[in-house]
Amino acid sequence: MPTTLVRNGTVVTARETTLADVLIEGSRIEAVLPGISPPPGATVIDATGTYVIPGGIDAHTHLDMPFGGTTSADDFETGTRAAAFGGTTTIVDFAIQARGTRMRDALDIWWKKAEGRACVDYGLHMIVTDLGNAGLEDMDDMVREGVASFKLFMAYPNVLMVDDATIFKALSRTAKNGALICMHAENGSVIDVIVARALAEGKTAPIYHALTRPPRAEAEAVHRAIAMSEIAGAPVYIVHLSSEDALNEVREARDRGVPAFAETCPQYLLLSIEELERPNFEGAKYVFTPPLRPKEHQPKLWDGLRDDHLQVVSTDHCPFCFKEQKELGKNDFSKIPNGGPGVEHRLSLIYSGGVHGGKFSANRFVQLISTAPAKLFGLYPRKGTIAVGSDADIVIFDPNAEQVISAKTHHMRIDYSMYEGMRVKGVTKTVLSRGRVIIDNGAFTGKPGAGEFLRRQTYSGAH
Ligand code: URP
Ligand code: ZN
Ligand code: ZN
């Protein structure tokens, strides 16, 4: 069992900031104390002047996912390696139940996609498209397999959308089996009418993707999702929340004591609707759902993160190359595959904008990118903190180092960056996954297949 000592760093958890060394025996943390003497034979990592934080947890990625007539460009190898470069040591990806099939079929397919490829640990949510005869029993079956959360779509009619009866039945089941429903909250039926009208008027450019999905369509669905969760007596987690309107719905519910949770993503905090107006079809690089909003929404979302109206920052990493993939929608914005890349830069973007931007503390940063998703998705305290007995998923993060983000230097398998040229302050240097160094001062030293499937516990009153 290898022994590693991370020395002289500042350990930052969601609760405290302390000068301490971290002793690792094998895959677990053995001690967190100041002044630990290196045991004989231990590998010593000097963390002087840097932060030692728990590995990032990205609770929303789509690797190797068939969608929009193509497949997302990163598979489990390239996507998890890129995640590791940026300090993310756990992802929770989405398996998709194809209509008319059992959830176990989907689970088998996604396990195969990850097998031998994942460079960091991974869990899976199950996207429910069809409760059929056995769907509710299937949900219990998934929970027993450690797939303790389900995503339901209120958008994409005829593709992934399910009706309110299905949503209510699924929520009611989670009230019994303890799982958590993740909701894509947009009113898909209304949006489809607006999209059809736009196309009939010859409005085919990427910007119409955003203009046909108004914030009120998001807020209405968030309101409905929360109301149904209240009736069912189950918690609900709103994914990729993008607008002030939607945030107000979550805040109002939480103020009443309702267990409603929500994540937002770096793109909604840092980019705005103008990106979709880029010339030469380049706006397509920013086509994802919900869409980017006018700039005024951004400070509201940052405030929401600070004040715990929003609990998590994930990426919704769903990369499609500009060439050949985004180009599928050259003459019709509704055919542009929806999704954007981001798994690599979440920590730097949120540290830079959030902590250096004076919006919240380094402890809140750790909570948003690691501890809160660990708690909500049944991984805590194995993941999400630096404590005795936890997995030694550790990031040595230099809060003062700077980096310019570019597709020329990133590790995601995609031909553009949504943040091209953006300078960020706060950079991942070294990463340990269960005690093994997988990024060593910016170089990948991990191994495809070393990442393990995580059997997650059910949501357990984390709020
Ligand atoms: O545009 C997006 N967000 N693509 C990924 C699928 C989803 O809805 O999360
Ligand atoms: Zn979604
Ligand atoms: Zn998504």
Image (spheres, rainbow, N blue to C red):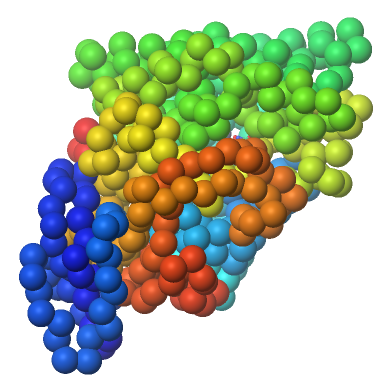
Q: 212 and 348: which one is in front? A: 348
Which residue is drawn at the image coordinates 39% and 66% (left, top)? 430
Which residue is drawn at the image coordinates 32% and 28% (left, top)? 358
Q: Where residue 317 sits in the image (x, y, percent)? A: 57, 45
Q: 1 and 418: which one is in front? A: 418
- Viewport quadrant of the N terminus: bottom left
Which residue is drawn at the image coordinates 86% and 13% (left, top)? 203
Q: Where residue 371 sits in the image (x, y, percent)? A: 27, 46
Q: How many marks?
A: 0
Q: 371 and 98: which one is in front? A: 371
Q: Measured along the vertical axis of the image, is residue 118 above or below residue 202?
A: below
**Is residue 425 visible from the viewing direction of this image?**
yes
Left or right of 65 in this view: 93: left
Q: Where residue 341 sits in the image (x, y, percent)? A: 62, 44
Q: Measured along the vertical axis of the image, is residue 397 above or below residue 260?
A: below
**Is residue 312 visible from the viewing direction of this image?**
no
Q: Measured along the vertical axis of the image, is residue 210 above or below residue 351?
A: above
Q: Measured along the vertical axis of the image, is residue 108 above or below residue 228?
A: below
Q: Where residue 315 sits in the image (x, y, percent)? A: 51, 41
Which residue is drawn at the image coordinates 25% and 63% (left, top)? 48
Left or right of 362 in this view: 369: right
| Quarter holding residue 11 | bottom left
